[in-house]
Image (cartoon, grey):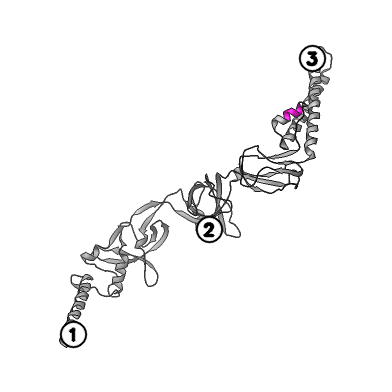
Amino acid sequence: MKSEIVHSTGRGSCAVFCVLGLLLAGCSSGGSVNPPASATPGNLKLSATQLQHVHLHTVAESKFRKAVQTSGTVDFDADRATGVLAPISGPVGKLLVAAGDRVKKGQVLATVESPDFAAAVGALRKAEAAARTARNIADVDKDLLAYKGVSDREAVQAQSDAIGAESDRDAARQALAALGVDAKSIAAIASGGDVAFPGGTIRAPLAGIVVERFITPGQLLQAGTTACFTIADVSRVWVLAQVFGADIGQVAVGDSAQIQAGDTALQGKVTNVADEVDATTRAVVARVSVDNPHGALKKQMYVRVSIVSRNETNGLLAPVSAILRDDENLPFVYVAQADGGFARAHVTPGYRDGDNYQIDAGLKAGDQIVADGGLFLQFMQSQ
């Protein structure tokens, strides 16, 4: 029994020594073991088998477009949104729309029980009568002037009076239109007909969505002061992106931008860059105009913004996978040497362009660096 144990142990020891020998052979060149990193830190050689796991990248001057990554908030496009003020004083009669409703331009949003309407109707009828009378007198005086029936002065005065009366009539029509009265009803009033119109109306000044409603039935409105609704065309919105520090100089009007809201990605364009820095955030606001056909972007929504410069930048690019860190946390790459070995070169990574870093210092065009397999080299050097 002891003999069997001894023989078994001997065979196990032999197997262990064989594995160690193979590992040492794999980490050697020309049959010798690599010395410690401290002995040859600048030149590490690999066997032909080990070189199969190392992939090189040739550093070259490349063109790329820098992108600024930041955040922003959604707002209405001011050119496609408006607040609706009460055009007439009085209590709210009926509300005909609610927040979220889509409306057409000129659609009635609410009615207002106001005495202003009756006063405006009376003013228009008086102005129409005065304008017709003044025009008739001016036409008669014009005919009489041809036969010296009136003086030139009287004919000129009659024409002036007619023009003034017609201006008053037009102003009275505009006053009714401002109260929300449609053109057909105004024409009927001007001709002296009866119009069944219980009061004033508040109409949509543009087509869009009622995004805010501020009034309730019975609320007393003050003409030109009380805010009633906000209507916006949300098929296009603004994203107000915050740009900080060195990135400020990278953003310009015309740059393209991608807006990320959850799983939704939308394309936009920078239409304005503020001329001042916000005193609180120390950021400059870049306004991005974004098509929003399905309404995915809502006002005050927080989104991610990537602004890509229109101008190309030249620089040396190195793969992100090639950048390693030493014991002092300094970035370096492995550079292929003329003798077939690899040496460390400390670099200064700058802007990251996708899977590449712009190298500001430490490399030159034509250098071959280890793109994949650098960790393996680093491990071997540490042995």
CA gap, disc 1 to disc 2?
Answer: 74 Å
Mark 2 neighbour class, 10 Å CA radius: few under 14, some 14 to 19, many 20 or more: some
Earlier in the chain: of badge 1 and badge 3, it is 1
Mark 3 neighbour class, 10 Å CA radius: few under 14, some 14 to 19, many 20 or more: few
Q: Which residue is mark 3?
A: 143
- Residue 257 seen in the figure: no
Quick one: which residue is furthest to the bottom in this view? 2
Quick one: which residue is furthest to the top in this view? 147
Q: Quadrant of the N terminus?
A: bottom left
Q: Which residue is mark 2?
A: 244
Q: Which element is circle 3 on?
A: helix
> Do the CB atoms of the residues marked 1 and 3 lie less than 8 Å apart?
no
Q: What residue type is disc 1 on?
A: Ile
Q: What residue type is disc 2 on?
A: Phe
Q: Nearer the viewer, residue 378 or 359?
A: 378
Magenta stretch bounds? 186-196
> Do the CB atoms of the residues marked 3 and 2 lie less than 8 Å apart?
no
x, y percentage for residue 188? Answer: 74, 28
Q: What residue type is disc 3 on?
A: Asp
Q: Is residue 171 above or below residue 156?
A: below
Q: Which residue is mark 1?
A: 5
Earlier in the chain: of badge 3 and badge 2, it is 3
**Residue 328 falls within the magenta-colored stretch:** no
> Which residue is at 18% across, 82% downward?
8
**How many numbered callouts?**
3
**Residue 188 falls within the magenta-colored stretch:** yes
Q: Nearer the viewer, residue 347 or 184?
A: 184
